[in-house]
Image (cartoon, rainbow, N blue to C red):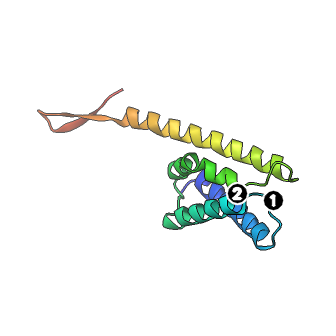
Amino acid sequence: MGQFGIETRKWLESAIKQRKYLLKNNKSHKSELEVEIAIKILDELLSMYSYKNDVYMARFIRQNLVWIENILPGSGATGYQKKLAELKEINKQAILLIEGHEAQILIRKQVTNPNTKQYEMVF
């Protein structure tokens, strides 16, 4: 269970909750249909898996970036710059985590020696 996965999930759930509140009280200035679709998709995907693993959460962020952007405050809102900066930082961390994970996979790639049935590390 990584810190990135846990903290990012909390941040995302908070953003969803805030957008739901704005929709419920008719204070959202964004397209209601787009926001409702984004909320439904993100809620369903988050409920399917815990995403506590950092790499899984990083992939989730990268794959669903458009939906996440749809639930952020609009460009005229006071919290827009802050939330956008937070999302950019999360996205940057997600990219680094995925790249680091892929590099580890290449380092750990193993080749079987047919004569000894042992594994040798390939660098």
Expressed as whole percent of the image width and height from the top left, the position of residue 53 reads: 51, 54
The kind of residue tagged 2 is Ile
Expressed as whole percent of the image width and height from the top left, the position of residue 123 reads: 36, 26
Instruction: Left or right? Give the position of 98 relative to 39.
Output: left
On residue 67, the disc is none
Task: Determine the CA span between mark 2 and mark 1.
Answer: 11 Å
Mark 1, residue position: 29
Q: Secondary structure at mark 1?
A: loop
Expressed as whole percent of the image width and height from the top left, the position of residue 18 reads: 76, 65
Pick the front one: 13 or 52: 13
Q: In front of the other: label 2 or label 1?
A: 1
Instruction: Left or right? Give the position of 39 relative to 99.
Output: right
The kind of residue tagged 1 is His
Q: Secondary structure at mark 2?
A: helix
Pick the front one: 6 or 59: 59
Q: Is residue 101 above or below residue 16?
A: above
How packed mark 2 is, by other alpha carbons closer than 10 Å (few <14, some 14-19, many 20 or more), is: many
Instruction: Left or right? Give the position of 7 relative to 100.
Output: right
Mark 2, residue position: 71
Q: Is residue 114 above or below residue 53?
A: above
Which quadrant of the structure image shows residue 105? top left
Which quadrant of the structure image shows residue 9? bottom right
Residue at 83 percent of width and 66 percent of height: 27
